[in-house]
Amino acid sequence: MKLKGYLLAALAAATYGTIPAFAVPLYAGGMNANSVLVFRYLLGLVFVALMCLARGRSLRLERRQIAPVAILGLLMAASSLTLFESYNYMNSGVASTLLFVYPIIVAIIMTLVYHERFKPLTAVCLAIMACGLVLLIRNDGGFALDPFGFLLVMVSSAAYAAYLVMVNVSKRINAIPTVVLLFYVLLFGSLLFGFVMLLGCEFTLPSAPWMWADVAALALIPTVISLICTTVAIQCIGSTPTAIFGALEPVTAVILSVSVLGQMITGREIAGGVLIIISTTLVVVGDKVEPVLLRARRMFPSLRRRR
């Protein structure tokens, strides 16, 4: 059972990391980010609806669940839209790596809003993450990342962190089956893209057969398959190991950005990405690391006396 969970967690992270490989070619084919996401969400909605039908799941929600689910959908859509837009301003692999600061944002929200204990390890992780961000923001040649692109990724990460916090603390949401929740997240999220079109954003259609295949794969692989694998993995091995495997998301994105999209990445950017992955992984495993550090500290009491 554990082996199955580990394999599914790795698959979930790796498939989610394929987003840039599907999205960036669609931009080159003439589509904009909002239109790509319309197809991603609506086709994903069809896939999930078929799954609910096959499982005999009712899509009925209680009236008190509608508002929080709608907020979840809008948060997820906002995270998706800002991330997809950031690909127009920076290397998609770097953008996916920057997105991975969301576990630390979750920890900060839980501390400031829900008054969880601020752990010393979190402060250490923030320092490590800051070093990683400095390396990513300015490369070896002194060229800085596009400020607007960087801002878009930070907004995306913050929106996704808020999404995760809400899923974690809301009893109304926790009572909804995962597949049903995903259906409504995609449904309400699609409303944001419709609103963006009403504001004047052009709606662009795939202009070639390969583009239709691409948008279908985008809806299926990094959306439906990834989220389902994540859910099953959590059931098999728990949320902490599953979250650790999330480090494969930016790794996959960087590899595909370089090998498939032909984008360049520097050693400094790789080092910065590694620091961000280390910092977020430490946040995820913090509950297990801190007891080890405390035991080590007790083994060397002289260290405390010197201080």
Image: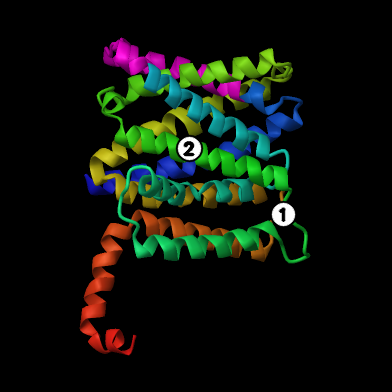
Q: Amino acid at mark 2?
A: Tyr
The residue lying at 26 percent from left, 79 percent from top is 297
Q: Which mark is residue 264?
A: 1
- Where in the figure is residue 47, as x and y percent of width and height? 44, 18
Answer with left or right where residue 260 lies relative to residue 5: right
Image point 52% across, 42% down: which residue? 157
Residue sitting at x 68%, y 40%:
87
Above-or-below relation of 167 to 191? below
> What's the coloring here?
rainbow
Residue pictured at 72% horizontal, 52% vertical: 145
**Most frequent secondary structure within the magenta stretch:** helix
Left/right of residue 144 with respect to residue 150 in the rendered view: right
Q: How many marks?
A: 2
Which of the two discs, 1 and 2, sits closer to the camera?
Answer: 2
Choose between 32 and 201: the one closer to the eye. 201
User: Residue beneath label 2, please?
Assistant: 160
